[in-house]
Amino acid sequence: MPLTMAKEGERNSVKKVGGKAETRQFLENLGFVPGSRITVITEISGNVIVNIKESRVAISREMASKIMV
């Protein structure tokens, strides 16, 4: 399922990152690689704040929809 459907506080694992090559590279640089553990902190106006690799990262709804968990 896409990251946008994950519930707040739920721990998931990144399964796949989709999108164009530059989008995938950008997300991989932030730590969104297959196997990474990810927790949704909150969702504000469609944008998602997640905890990944000991860091909090805010990404847009469009970017979050490209991350499968």
Image (cartoon, rainbow, N blue to C red):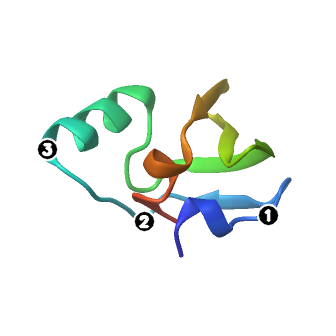
Q: Residue at x 74, y 48 (%)?
A: 40
Q: Residue at x 60, y 50 (%)?
A: 37
Q: Position of residue 21 (x, y in %)?
A: 14, 44
Q: What crowding class fits label 2: few (fewer than 14 Cα within 10 Å), some (14-19), or many (20 or more)?
A: some
What residue does disc 3 label?
21
- Along the polypeptide, which appears first: circle 2 or circle 1? 1
Q: Earlier in the sequence, mark 3 or mark 2?
A: 2
Q: Which mark is residue 29?
A: none
Name which residue type carries label 1.
Lys
In the drawing, does residue 48 fall left or right of residue 36?
A: right
Q: Which residue is mark 2?
A: 15
Going by the picture, which residue comes out furthest to the right?
Answer: 9
Which tag, 1 or 3, sits closer to the chain's start? Answer: 1
Q: Secondary structure at mark 3?
A: helix
Above or below for 6 versus 47: below
Q: Front-most of 38 and 48?
A: 48
The answer to whether residue 53 is seen in the rendering is no
- How many residues crowd mark 3 within 10 Å: few (<14), some (14–19), many (20+)? few
